[in-house]
């Protein structure tokens, strides 16, 4: 391993995605200011699908590129297991992730790697900017009020607010393998991975910066449709196992947050009655949080939309 110039592998699972988006993701890695990178594409398309044929044809252009690994799953495995295949195939000392329709800004790998090296972190995460197809900011995830990085404080914060998503993560490869990689989950793969990282006492750092652009749209994707609804309900049931460490007020917030997510999940599935029902439960779960979080969200988006992407 090179201590001054370690290799960074970027794992990209692809599933039912137009190749123009995959090309954008790949180019955003090729255009990184940090050059010792490796791109690992994991083709998780169904073998007999048009997407598999198109992706195979598209990837031929990288056949002689030593910095690109193309791994083809024998069958559709889902996002978690597809990423685990990418982890196995990667040769870098550090590893990070990118979805097939998202992109890194040019300094992402360099900034985060230098941050990791500066304090010898096992794992780090950053802010995340979510945009519409025409690059209008629709959400911005940041964590300015993390008061402590001890195990218990991070655990509580993560269960309440989610220290995610996946493209913001960077790991030492050996540490990621030690904790077993991703869990096989329909939804919340990055939630469970971060949870394991905290519970297994990895040295975790937060870089309050954003060089990841995630696009929100309804084309392709691994965690869509009914899977989203089933997965989110399963995740909420899972969180209840930890309720003993929370105050009543904190449990109210967790319930509020779950139903806020379900409002969107049902709406995207055109189950409008259930979406409305979730909205009512969300408000009744914690009217105080409803007012605070809606106000915070609107203010945050207004401020971030004035920022140049």
Image: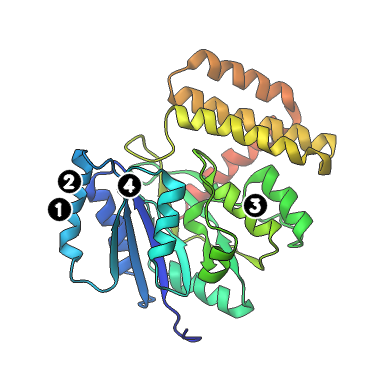
Q: Nearer the viewer, mark 4 or mark 3?
A: 4
Lower position in the chain sequence, tag 1 or tag 3: 1
In three-dimensional space, the C-alpha distance between marks 2 and 3, rounded to whole angstroms, equals 36 Å
Question: Which residue is at 52% across, 60% downward?
Answer: 169
Residue 206 in percent (x, y) is at 62, 63
N-terminal label among 2 and 3? 2
Identify the mark at residue 57; answer none if there is no mark.
1
What colouring does the structure picture have? rainbow
Q: In the displayed image of the protein, which residue is found farthest to the top?
A: 273
Disc ID at residue 195: 3
Of marks 4 and 2, which one's residue comes earlier in the chain?
Answer: 4
Residue 262 spot, x, y in % from top left: 56, 27
In the picture of the structure, the residue carrying the numbered disc 4 is 44
Tell which circle, 4 or 1, labels the residue nearer the N-terminal end. Answer: 4
- Between the residue at mark 4 and the residue at mark 1, the CA separation in whole angstroms equals 15 Å
Query: Label 4 crowding class (10 Å Cα cut-off): few <14, some 14-19, many 20+?
Result: many
In the rendered image, which residue does mark 2 sit on? Answer: 53
Which numbered disc flags the more N-terminal residue, 4 or 3?
4
Neighbour class for label 2 at 10 Å: few (<14), some, many (≥20)?
A: few
Q: Secondary structure at mark 3?
A: helix
């Amino acid at each position: 391993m090179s201590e001054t110039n370690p290799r960074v592998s970027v794992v990209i699972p692809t599933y039912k995605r137009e190749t123009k988006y995959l090309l954008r993701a790949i180019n955003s890695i090729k255009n990184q200011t940090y050059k010792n990178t490796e791109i690992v594409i994991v083709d998780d398309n169904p073998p007999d699908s048009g997407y598999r044929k198109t992706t195979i044809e598209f990837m031929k252009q990288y056949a002689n590129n030593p910095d690109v690994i193309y791994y083809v799953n024998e069958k559709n495995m889902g996002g978690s297991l597809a990423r685990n295949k990418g982890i196995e195939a990667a040769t870098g000392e550090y590893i990070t992730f990118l979805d097939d329709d998202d992109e890194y800004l040019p300094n992402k790998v360099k900034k985060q790697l230098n941050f990791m090296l500066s304090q010898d972190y096992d794992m780090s995460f950053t802010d995340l900017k979510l945009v519409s197809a025409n690059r209008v900011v629709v959400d911005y995830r940041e964590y300015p009020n993390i008061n402590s990085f001890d195990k218990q404080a991070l655990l509580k914060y993560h269960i309440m607010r989610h220290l995610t998503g996946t493209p913001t993560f960077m790991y030492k490869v050996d540490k990621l393998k030690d904790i077993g990689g991703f869990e096989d989950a329909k939804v919340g793969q990055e939630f469970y991975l971060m949870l394991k990282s905290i519970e297994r006492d990895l040295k975790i750092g937060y870089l309050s910066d954003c060089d990841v652009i995630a696009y929100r749209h309804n084309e392709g994707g691994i965690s869509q449709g009914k899977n989203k609804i089933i997965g989110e309900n399963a995740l909420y049931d899972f969180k209840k196992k930890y309720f003993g460490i929370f105050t009543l007020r904190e449990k109210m917030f967790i319930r509020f947050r779950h139903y806020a997510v379900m409002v969107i999940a049902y709406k995207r599935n055109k189950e409008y009655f259930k979406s409305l029902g979730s909205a009512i439960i969300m408000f009744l779960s914690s009217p105080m949080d409803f007012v605070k979080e809606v106000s915070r969200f609107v203010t945050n988006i207004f401020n971030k939309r004035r920022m140049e992407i």
